[in-house]
Amino acid sequence: MYLAKRSNYVWSVWELDKKTNILSKKTARLRGWIQAVATLLTNIHIPNFWKGKIYQGNTKTICVPGLNCYSCPAAAGSCPIGAFQAVVGSSRFQFAYYITGFFILLGVTLGRFICGFLCPFGWFQDILHKIPGKKFSTAKLKPLRYLKYMILIIFVILLPVLVTNSIGMGDPFFCKYICPQGVLEGAIPLALGNSAIRTALGRLFSFKCMILITVIVLSILFYRPFCKWICPLGAIYSLFNKVSLLSIQVEKDKCIGCQQCIKVCQMDVNVLKAPNHPECIRCGVCMKACPKDAIHYQFMGK
């Protein structure tokens, strides 16, 4: 009787493990489609591109998970980084409770899965990197990873709080002076559809266009340079990668040490040593490369 129960238990665990691996691989294979759907849902008001105006409905009070400019004519919600700067840079508020809670909720639940699956600008970089041509590794550029944390602290938090105008309002420094997504999704579409905006464009627009062009060129040559080195939203989510409910599990008893997972990882993560490294965007490429199905997603330890 004991042996029968034990056998049934082992079989159940094996079946569950098999289903988990299959689901993980399917999710990884469908990643491009999930990114496309997420981008569409984030920018659902497409007719506004032709109207040359920004959607300002009720959903604009809600933040979306990824980096998506508020000024995009089609944007259904607000960019969390832009919203955070608007709150901390305002004399009317002392602390960004809603946005901070938003970051913690998504960070603890998904970590940088958002970067890999739900961020429109991440998908944009993925598409650019697929353009044929010589590609370069960023393995020797790992110190640049810390630049995004400096940008988060200085441009997203400190400058909007400390540098204010006569009425106590701070500029959204990251959005205004660095973020290329604002130009790609906001300034360019609005300028194309609105003649008044076109005539108002000046040096700042030209400067931001140069940043966008630089990111585009780098994205063709390197994998996700903006995500690795610049994005403050990725920096925030990375803080939760090791504790988030959704994680990546490597089954040591299945691993044969071929290191295929490490070789294919374009985020320069040692999957075997640190599968939930802060730089991991949980894209699932390592899962697809593993010949023994030893790597899979797990949620709440299951």
Image: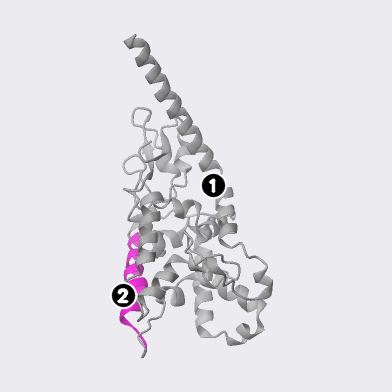
User: Which of the colour schemes (rainbow, by chain, secondary structure, one colour) is used?
Assistant: one colour
From the viewer's side, name the closer residue of 259 and 78: 78
Q: Position of residue 104 (x, y in %)?
A: 35, 57
Q: Residues within 10 Å of mark 1 (few under 14, many from 20)?
A: some
Mark 1 → mark 2, Cα distance in angstroms: 39 Å
Asked if residue 156 is among those painted magenta in the image, a careful observer would answer yes
Per the rendered image, the range of residues in magenta is 144-165
**In this view, 2 is above or below 41:** above
For marks 1 and 2 on the same chain, the one whose residue lies earlier in the sequence: 1
Q: How many marks?
A: 2
| Mark 1: secondary structure | helix
Q: Is residue 63 visible?
A: yes
Q: Position of residue 206 (x, y in %)?
A: 53, 80
Quarter occupied by the N terminus: top left
Mainly helix, strand or loop, the magenta region? helix
Q: Residues within 10 Å of mark 2 (few under 14, many from 20)?
A: few
The residue sitting at 45% across, 77% down in the picture is: 176
**In this view, 196 is above or below 2:** below
Question: Badges 1 and 2: C-beta atoms under 8 Å apart?
Answer: no
Q: Is residue 141 visible?
A: no
Kindly identify which residue carries mark 1: 31
The residue sitting at 39% across, 50% down in the picture is: 109
Q: Position of residue 290 (x, y in %)?
A: 45, 34
Residue occupying the far front of the picture: 58
**Is 45 displayed left or right of 260 in the figure?**
right
**Residue type at numbered disc 2:** Gln
Kindly identify which residue carries mark 2: 94
**In this view, 183 is above or below 299:** below
